[in-house]
Amino acid sequence: MKYYIYLSLLVGSILVVNQHTIAQASDSQTEQFQNRIVDSIFSETLNESRDFWVRLPDNYKPGNDEKYAVIYLMDGFSLESTLEAVYSNYWGHYLPHMILVGISNRSNRTRDLTTSQVKMRRGSAMDSETGGAETFTKFMEEELIPYIDSKYPTMAYRTLIGHSYAGLFTINMLVNHKHLFQNYIAIDPSLDWDDQKLLKEAKEKLSKESYEGKSLYVSLAAEQLHMWNEEITMENIMDDSSEFTLFARSIIEFSNYAKSQKQNGLNFSWKVYHEDLHGTVPLPSIRDGLIFLFEWYQFKSPQKYNNPETPLEELVSLLKKQEQIYTEQFGVPTAPMIDEMLNGYGYMNMQMGQPEKAFMFFEMNIKYNPTSANAYDSMAEYYESQNDKENALKYLNKAYEISGDDYYKERIEALNKK
């Protein structure tokens, strides 16, 4: 399939326009994720049904051997469009293809996400159950995650995202159940809960336990640090001892402490969002958090791939190093680039008159995506460019065999007439 490639040397990204699938591309612009499933399971642990949605990557194909990392999003139906906006804009260079799972917390939210029982909060009686985080964790560990793993092509590389009470839940998951997830994003977490009970427990564990291989990103919305006192700023908030600043002070105290505990191996970062409120901070937090958590995924020396002067041998070496990084992080053999990028660089090098490099990228795409009709079609175009009709037909026939798409049949017929 013919691609036209435009490169940005600053980020090494590739825009690919496929004329055969232009109608599909238009559809995907209005609905970024074509593979969205809404599901539910009855939980014996919770004694109730729990709804969730699953979004499969754009390159997902039933029967394909490829496995995917998974993002679990608390308050999934409320924050679905937020995660979708970030992920759809950053996969490729910044993020791998992943399976997204959004868990409903529309009912019994306070019960399920808070880490201890309280009767009073901020001077008022609680009007809902509290302290069920451990029970909800059991539901996730023993029911939801096994269900997702049994039904979808997942790898055991998971990221958990939570906001507010769900941010409290996320930090509790790291502190007390760190075997379940590799990555955590805690957005404006309610660490003031129950007189900072989890904060105190977290400080104790962060000082003594190992968190090697774990990453945590924490955010704080600082537009309104105090409910009514505009004189409270980030510079003087820790001098205030009122209930009105306890929420923000708890996040700051936790973050400063976590940053100081270098010996535990936790990959930690946090950020204050001065222009955001509690309700607006999820969007920038998810963006910055995912980029931080997957910093290792971003290409090393992207300019080398774009530079026509880079020798083939150096490109091969760079790809091997990238593959090694991905494989070490994910724990399973992983291609050094997603299929769209391998394909795109193949066409780019064809256009630049570098057939050996083009062949290398197309060949690697077939190696890692042996059930992709598009990968074989791209190799067929390579052979057409080299006036090798026999091999072009060989790869077109393979593309047609895999997909049954009449497009490839028409391409075969047209090539046979030449």
Image: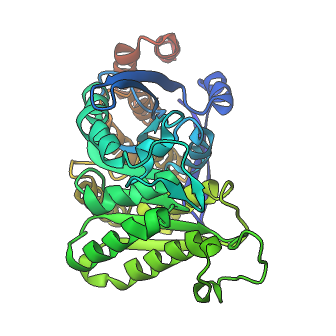
Colour scheme: rainbow
Q: Position of residue 313 (x, y in %)?
A: 31, 64
The answer, for residue 316, to whether it is visible in the render is no
Q: Nearer the viewer, residue 175 or 372?
A: 175
Q: Is residue 157 above or below residue 237?
A: above
Q: Position of residue 81 (x, y in %)?
A: 62, 40
Callout count? 0
* Residue at image location 29% in from the left, 49% down from the top: 157
* Residue at image location 48% in from the left, 56% down from the top: 167
* Residue at image location 36% in from the left, 62% down from the top: 315
Task: Give residue 85's quadrant in the image.
Answer: top right
Q: Position of residue 31 (x, y in %)?
A: 63, 29
Q: Nearer the viewer, residue 200 or 98?
A: 200
Q: Nearer the viewer, residue 257 or 366?
A: 257
The answer, for residue 107, to whether it is visible in the render is yes
Q: Nearer the viewer, residue 251 or 198?
A: 198
Q: Position of residue 381 (x, y in %)?
A: 47, 32
Q: Is residue 239 above or below residue 153?
A: below
> Is 60 displayed left or right of 287 in the figure?
left
Q: Is residue 253 above or below residue 82?
A: below
> Is 400 displayed left or right of 81 in the figure?
left
Q: Is residue 257 above or below residue 112?
A: below
* Residue at image location 21% in from the left, 78% down from the top: 208
